[in-house]
Amino acid sequence: MKDDSLKDITRAMREFVERRGWQEFQTPKNLAMALCGEAGELAAELQWLDGEASRDPLPEKRERIAAEMADVLLYLVRMADELDIDLAAAALAKCEANERKYPEKLVQGDLRLRDEYEE
């Protein structure tokens, strides 16, 4: 499969689940729990790398990271499908909200929680 849009991935995952008769198990709660597990596996791949090594991991490590990232994405896409949420639209809306929440002039070069900045 060479498709890369969220719609194509959603369709492929829905078909995968349906062919296996797993729909009853793919509840938003179960998918969220699986997503957390996969995020933990992704974090474990990066856990002991320093900042530079995490930006440029060795090829074998990069493959494992890519596989864990794919697992996270697939569970997130399945959850969005089950909840009938347009994940791309939700992500773009969140980007716009973050633009308003963290104005460049206020936060440039400074990483803190939003309520820790003075306007």
Image (spheres, rainbow, N blue to C red):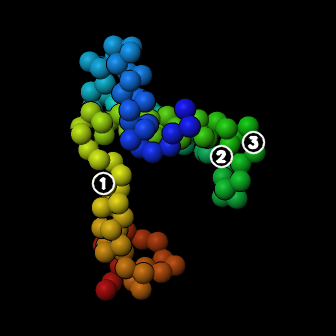
Q: As shown in the figure, which amino acid type bears the numbered disc 1?
A: Ala
Q: Which mark is residue 59?
A: 3
Mark 2 nearby-residue class (10 Å; few <14, some 14–19, many ≥20): few
**Sequence order check: which comes first, mark 2 or mark 3?**
2
The amino acid type of the residue labelled 2 equals Trp
Q: Nearer the viewer, mark 1 or mark 3?
A: 1
Give the residue drawn at x 30%, y 36%.
81
Q: Report the residue marked by disc 1.
A: 90
Point 45% across, 45% down: residue: 5
Q: Which numbered dot is residue 48?
A: 2
Q: Is residue 11 above or below residue 119?
A: above
Which amino acid, by three-letter code, is at mark 3? Pro
Q: Looking at this rendering, what residue extends furthest in the left direction?
A: 83
The N terminus lies in quadrant: top right
- Please report the residue visible at 41 percent of the width from the left and 43 percent of the height from the top: 6
Q: Is residue 41 above or below residue 109?
A: above
Q: Who comes first in sequence, dot 1 or dot 3?
A: 3
97 or 37: which is nearer to us?
Answer: 97
Contact (CB < 8 A) between labels 1 and 3? no
Whether residues under marks 1 and 2 lie with C-beta atoms below 8 angstroms apart, the answer is no
> Pointer 1: residues within 10 angstroms few (<14), some, or many (20+)?
few
Foreground: disc 1 or disc 2? 1
Marks 2 and 3: which is nearer the front?
3
Q: CA distance from mark 1 to mark 2?
A: 32 Å
Above or below — where is 95 with respect to 88? below
Q: CA distance from mark 1 to mark 3?
A: 33 Å
Q: Regarding mark 3 in the picture, which secondary structure is present there?
A: helix
Q: Position of residue 2 (x, y in %)?
A: 56, 37
Residue 77 image point, x, y percent: 38, 38
Of the numbered discs in the image, which one, if any, rests on residue 103?
none
